[in-house]
């Protein structure tokens, strides 16, 4: 574990005492939140190089200052109606943890919304919809100013399905 | 003391391994009976530092073992003992043992104690064979202090002395400055037994001249009691190199004192700094000699010559100047300054390119690192097999990427072994064939284009085409009647088939690690290729072709639809426009192209990668004939764009391995292009079952 990560984790722990900060974004009218400490940067959409034989929600890879970063379209990932990419389309670059390894990935969202403080105990577990909706990726639901924010578990979300990595592969 | 000893331990092990390499290479050059003084000195010095270091880090077994080696070497050095072939062999075995011990200290596996005991017994037998050499303590030594106190007990190294110890302790003037305190040392000694110290004030300056921080008193210490020698030595461990120290059993002390007191003054002062200074200087020298270590022990650090670092610093300096020039220009840029801006930018480009080349060169090491293990191997193997083999090496200074170097070591070992074991004939057979009794194995490395070529050439019997063919038929790789029509190259290619080990083909000596198929696989994994030439009676040549570095490859940019892919240039054989009449399809699906005499499977790249091409018509596109994993195929692409060097970026860092792709790179315009994994894509589209067609075509 590198120093930055330790600090980040340390911050993480501190935050849990008096609430975490979440960056929220819009996706088909709903507001979703991710832990702000995982957000590396927010950038506009640039054409990605598609990777053959991968599901359509993996839009391809981009060059992020010399690093190859895969881009995931969250609309398609959630099975929502895909949208044309435009000047407002935003890519949130996130750090995803998998075991003790971390990866950098970008997610395409409709727009970035706000930053909220949410107390850990104010998070309500997502109700179980059975097989209708997979709520594994949902860490919990938060209510901010009367609106519902869906807090995502990005480690789970971006390590599942086709994005899953065998432990061995990451260990090179 | 809470110093992180781990870090020093790693350095110690690395340096010791280098020391062993030096010992080994000097020993191999040494001729019985005519040892040159500085050769022996070199070996001795290496052994000595290993002993000193291992004692500091508490590797008792290494200390004890090297101590015996060192004592013997010391006798050789002082001319008391002649260098015999037996001694050289024994020293070589000792080098192996110490290397094993170091590896076990590092990685914690058990070593073969029986073997250690055997070699140690051999050393001790030799040590005892010349009574003149006893007691070793009286021999002059390299850096007085440390040697003296070790030598004092060479005869009874393990046995604790009964009566106690006489210790002569003469601190160098600087000793106190490093925080060592005589009082503290004595207090510790006093805890061991009956302690008595006499101060020798003869070196005391007059009060006016006295520097309070200098130690100028020497001591004669008598320590009585049942005390193990190690316990005494341990107390002085930290001041080893800052004092003159002798430790003798009490009863012998009287006889020895005059000798030990007289000689260290001259040798110690003159020689000790040399030994202390030796590591940095010797390291650089040895870094050229250092070979890559045995399998699995890939080192994570790299030694870079000062010249390379200096060159880098200079270049960064230039870069900074260019940058400040440009930013100054940018502050008030007017149209008339555009020329200067252009100049500045081209300067920047030159700086960047040079910097890149030089940074890459840091990873480059001379191939002698990989070659250096072979003289030893040839020496051992030829005496074991009763053959006379001369190993010639050339092009050792050819530089190769460190990663490639580490991975090429084992395949090379295998090939050299094969050359000696199966290639070179026994002396009688050679004489019968009218050749010199001594066979030659020639290792050669050189650059060619963007590749490095390594040749392993022997002047042995050459490959036996008929036996290989017979074996291929036996294994069902070809039909009994097909053999005659195959070219030599095609026949030799069978050597690299799995399970087709050379041992089984050419002789019955087998069970020697990896087979040739693994050799080939390792080389292919590095993006290289291996090639065999042989003529009966004259010998065979194995040529390994490797890319200079793993981080950069020469790529052919190809276009499929809107996407650009990179095909590694090494795997491209040719590119051509197809003629309609030459395309055949088996069962309407598996398309083959008749290229001269071979049928080449066609892979439509847009199909494999699920893309929309310009045209699905075969004759509109281009066929790139490629070879990967020993199979050939034709890739259908829309267009060839250009060739360029690309820096390989891993897809796995942030994503995962994608079948048919070996990585990605960033093109000049900042976009990402994917690098095609030729072996993978052939596998992908052929589903694995067609090795035969591929290798026959090869």
Image: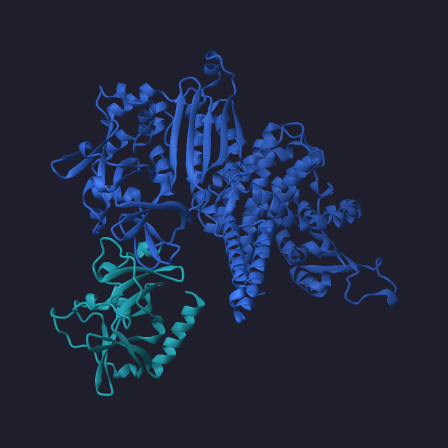
Q: In the displayed structure, does residue B602 sit left or right of residue B135?
A: left
Above or below for B322 versus A34: above
Residue B159 visible in the current orientation: no
Q: Residue at x 84, y 65 (%)?
A: B210
Residue B466 visible in the current orientation: yes
Above or below for B278 versus B455: below
Q: Residue at x 24, y 29 (%)?
A: B598
Q: Residue B665 location in percent, x, y?
A: 37, 53
Q: Quadrant of the C terminus of chain B?
A: top left
Give the residue at the far front of this rendering. Answer: B336
In the image, B552 versus B433, the foreground residue is B552
Q: In the displayed structure, does residue B130 sit left or right of residue B20?
A: right
Q: Colour of chain B?
A: blue
In the image, B3 versus B420, the foreground residue is B420
In the picture, one chain is cyan; tell me its letter: A
Q: Residue A17 location in percent, x, y?
A: 35, 82
Above or below for B680 versus B33: below
In the image, B364 versus B609, the foreground residue is B609
In the image, A98 versus B146, the foreground residue is A98
């Amino acid at each position: 574990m590198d120093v930055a990560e330790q600090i980040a984790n340390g911050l993480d722990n501190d935050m849990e005492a008096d609430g975490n900060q979440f960056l929220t974004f819009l996706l088909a009218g709903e507001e979703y939140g991710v832990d702000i400490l995982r957000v590396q940067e927010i950038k506009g959409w640039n054409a990605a190089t598609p990777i053959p034989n991968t599901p359509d929600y993996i839009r391809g890879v981009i060059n992020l200052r010399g690093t190859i970063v895969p881009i995931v379209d969250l609309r398609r990932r959630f099975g929502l109606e895909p949208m044309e990419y435009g000047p407002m389309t935003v890519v949130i670059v996130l750090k995803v943890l998998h075991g003790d390894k971390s990866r950098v990935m970008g997610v395409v969202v409709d727009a970035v919304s706000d930053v909220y403080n949410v107390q850990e105990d104010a998070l309500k577990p997502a109700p179980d919809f059975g097989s209708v909706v997979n709520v594994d990726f949902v860490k919990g639901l938060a209510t901010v100013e009367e609106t519902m924010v869906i807090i995502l578990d990005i480690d789970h979300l971006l390590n599942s399905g086709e994005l899953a990595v065998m432990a061995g592969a990451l260990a090179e | 003391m809470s110093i992180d000893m781990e870090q020093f331990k790693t350095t110690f092990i690395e340096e010791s391994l280098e020391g062993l390499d030096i010992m080994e290479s000097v020993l191999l050059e040494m001729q019985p009976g005519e040892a040159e003084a500085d050769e022996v000195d070199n070996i001795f010095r290496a052994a000595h530092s290993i002993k000193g270091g291992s004692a500091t880090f508490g590797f008792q077994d290494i200390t004890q073992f090297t101590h015996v080696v060192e004592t013997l070497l010391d006798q050789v050095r002082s001319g008391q003992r002649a260098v015999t072939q037996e001694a050289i062999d024994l020293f070589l075995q000792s080098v192996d043992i110490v290397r094993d011990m170091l590896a076990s200290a590092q990685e914690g596996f058990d070593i073969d104690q029986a073997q250690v005991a055997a070699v140690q017994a051999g050393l001790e037998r030799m040590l005892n064979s010349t009574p003149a050499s006893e007691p070793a303590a009286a021999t002059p030594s390299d850096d007085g202090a440390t040697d003296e106190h070790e030598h004092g007990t060479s005869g009874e190294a393990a046995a604790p002395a009964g009566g106690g110890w006489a210790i002569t302790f003469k601190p160098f003037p600087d000793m106190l400055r490093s925080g060592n305190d005589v009082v503290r040392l004595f207090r510790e000694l006093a805890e061991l037994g009956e302690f008595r110290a006499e101060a020798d004030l003869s070196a005391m300056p007059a009060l006016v001249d006295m520097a309070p921080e200098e130690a100028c008193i020497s001591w004669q210490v008598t320590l009585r009691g049942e005390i193990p020698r190690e316990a005494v030595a341990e107390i002085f461990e930290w001041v080893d190199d800052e004092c003159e120290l002798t430790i003798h059993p009490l009863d012998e002390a009287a006889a020895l004192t005059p000798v030990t007191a007289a000689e260290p003054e001259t040798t110690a002062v003159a020689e000790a700094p040399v030994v202390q200074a030796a590591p940095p200087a010797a390291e650089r020298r040895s870094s050229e000699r250092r070979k890559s270590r045995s399998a699995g022990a890939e080192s994570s650090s790299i030694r870079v010559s000062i010249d390379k670092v200096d060159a880098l610093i200079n270049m960064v300096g230039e870069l900074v100047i260019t940058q400040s020039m440009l930013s100054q220009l940018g502050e008030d840029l007017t149209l008339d300054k555009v020329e200067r801006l252009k100049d500045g930018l081209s300067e920047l480009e030159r700086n960047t390119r040079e910097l890149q080349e030089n940074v890459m060169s840091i990873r480059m090491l001379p191939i002698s690192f990989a070659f250096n293990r072979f003289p030893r191997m040839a020496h051992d193997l030829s005496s074991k097999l009763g053959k006379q083999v001369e190993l010639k090496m050339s092009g050792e200074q050819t530089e190769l990427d460190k990663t490639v170097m580490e991975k090429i070591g084992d395949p090379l070992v295998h090939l050299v072994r094969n050359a000696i074991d199966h290639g070179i004939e026994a002396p009688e057979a050679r004489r019968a064939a009218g050749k010199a009794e001594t066979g030659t194995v020639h290792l050669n490395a050189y650059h060619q284009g963007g590749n490095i070529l390594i040749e392993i050439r022997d002047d042995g019997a050459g490959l036996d085409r008929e036996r290989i063919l017979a074996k291929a038929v036996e294994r069902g790789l070809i039909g009994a009647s097909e053999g005659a029509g195959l070219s030599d190259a095609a026949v030799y290619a069978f050597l690299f088939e799995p399970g087709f080990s050379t041992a089984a083909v050419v002789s019955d000596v087998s069970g020697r690690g990896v087979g040739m198929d693994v050799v080939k696989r390792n080389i292919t994994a590095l993006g290289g290729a291996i090639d065999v030439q042989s003529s009966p009676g004259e010998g065979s040549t194995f040529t390994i072709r490797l890319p200079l570095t793993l981080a950069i490859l020469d790529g052919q940019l190809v276009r499929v639809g809107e996407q650009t892919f990179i095909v590694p240039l090494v795997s491209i054989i040719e590119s051509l426009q197809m003629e309609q009449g030459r395309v055949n399809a088996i069962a309407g699906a598996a398309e083959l192209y008749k290229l001269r005499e071979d049928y080449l499977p066609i892979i439509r790249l847009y199909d494999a990668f699920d893309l929309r091409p310009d045209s699905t018509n075969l004759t509109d596109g281009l066929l790139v004939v490629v070879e990967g994993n020993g199979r050939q195929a034709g890739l259908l692409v829309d267009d060839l764009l250009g060739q360029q060097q690309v820096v390989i970026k891993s897809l796995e860092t942030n994503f995962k391995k994608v079948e048919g792709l070996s990585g990605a790179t960033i093109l000049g315009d900042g976009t990402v292009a994917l690098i095609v994994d030729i072996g993978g894509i052939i596998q992908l589209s052929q589903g694995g079952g067609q090795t035969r067609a591929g290798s026959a075509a090869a």
